[in-house]
Amino acid sequence: MATGKLYRHSLALLTDLYQLTMAFGYWKLNRVEEQAIFNLVFREHPFNGGYTIAAGLETVISFLRDLEFDDEDIEYLGTLEGNDGEPLFDKEFLSYLSNMRFECDIDAMPEGTVAFPHEPLLRITGPILQCQILETALLNMLSYQTLIASKAARICNAARNEPVLEFGLRRAQGIDGGIAASRAAYIGGCIGTSNVLAGKLYGIPVRGTHAHSWVMSFDNEVESFEAYANALPNNCVFLVDTYDTIEGVKNAIIVGKKLKERGHKLAGIRLDSGDLAYLSIEARKLLDEAGFTDSDIVASNDLDEFIIDSLKRQDAKINVWGVGTKLATAYDQPALGGVLKLSAIRQPGQDWQYKVKLSEQTIKISNPGVLQVRRFHDRSGYIADMIYDEILGPGNEPIIIDPNDSTRRKRITTNPPHEDLLVPIFRKGELVYDLPSLTMIRQRVQEQIGALHPSIRRYMNPHNYPAGIEKKLYDLRTQLILEARGYNEKQNKS
């Protein structure tokens, strides 16, 4: 597993302190056997988009398979103090943690699945103490990669199936952010990365040639191109904008002709500044006139889906897109806003007690129950998604209700084909899921996006896909909300 290769020490303390203080509280109250269900959801699509790509599950699996508090973790926790200067945790609790092994059930959407607000990307069922400890790590691993995979899918859509390369490592939020971003961007549709460590860990194709500093280290541009061609004749994409872009293209052609005479190819040129539309058009003319019709024009320079779309509309002759900062940092939305919320609790052997979190904001009210997501489809693609409770069941002709607007409803009447999106990943702490390859995950992304109506795939002002709560669950949720707010219908009538 890549996580184990990247980190040589325990990650059990990858959590917020309040998760451990709550776990300690459950332990002191003898609630360690109490069972709970938590659901990891997001409330709005990132980037004002019409869909979101689930990613990061393999990282979660790797983390959970290796989860245990080692001696150093326990020793460190023993040094933490409360406000009175006394140890924060009892030694008996730390002993409990040192012997604890992961024993939860996990159900999740496979990576590469198209998801919508309020749908669980992951459901964890097990001892409440363990679920609580895992909250922060699950959110960290799933939320960020989901965010980047979604951004990559939008960028690749704007590029209209032309190759997109992820160049974001140097601008990413630290080592972890850079590695995770490269993986998620590849899932989302990028064909390669500049990140060599990500290439090693995940088998992602790596790409790159030279920078401006290479050109500047020589007396002139032609000399720099010739030196690079002599050193790496099978990797020649020349960066042509160090001094003058059009002259740089001409110099690349001079060296390209020498490469051709030696049986090699001028793979392309890269534009990294200036008017990319105009410069690419002029560069294409020069390359074609010189016989380099199959040489690529690669563009970089703070690209995102909106700039790429604008360049396409200007008939730019760019056919490979290098996207760095605005992809790896999710430039216009730095966080997905994922949350993990308790939806049910029970004592061993007893029935589930459903729980709902209230808020002054409707969008922040949680959904109770043993949640599952059912996706309906026909020959044309996806029809609607329904969040339902596995105990209540979905019904024969279910009605789907928008959780934020109860007047928006969709009835499923024709019994169309469907699939339930949450699949078993762990059972009692044991992995029961066959991990797909990254190639298979990438393919799933394309299949899933392709099954959406084009209006939903738009990255500006997309149409809303019908996704909501099954009516029986919605009615139960409403009842729980009223009860939590102290409204008793019988008392009100009297």
Image (cartoon, helix red, strand yellow):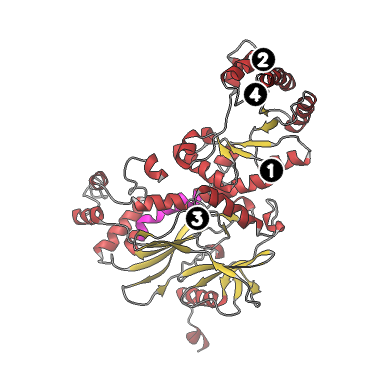
Seen at 54% across and 38% down, the residue is 205
Q: Position of residue 227 (x, y in %)?
A: 60, 15
The disc placed on residue 222 is 2
**Sooner in the amino-acid sequence: mark 3 or mark 2:** 2
Left/right of residue 78 with respect to residue 226 in the rendered view = left
Callout 1: 10 Å neighbours few (<14), some, many (20+)?
A: many
Q: Is residue 268 magenta?
A: no
Q: What span is in magenta?
A: 131-144
Circle 3 sits in a helix, a strand or a loop, which is it? loop
- As measured in the structure, the alpha-carbon distance from the residue carrying label 4 to the one carrying label 2 is 17 Å
Write down the quadrant of residue 37 in the picture.
bottom left
Seen at 67% across and 14% down, the residue is 222
| Pointer 3 with pointer 1, Cβ within 8 A | no
Q: Amino acid at mark 3?
A: Gly
Left/right of residue 70 with respect to residue 490 in the rendered view = left
Q: Amino acid at mark 1?
A: Ala
The foreground one among 119 and 3 is 3
| Pointer 2 with pointer 1, Cβ within 8 A | no
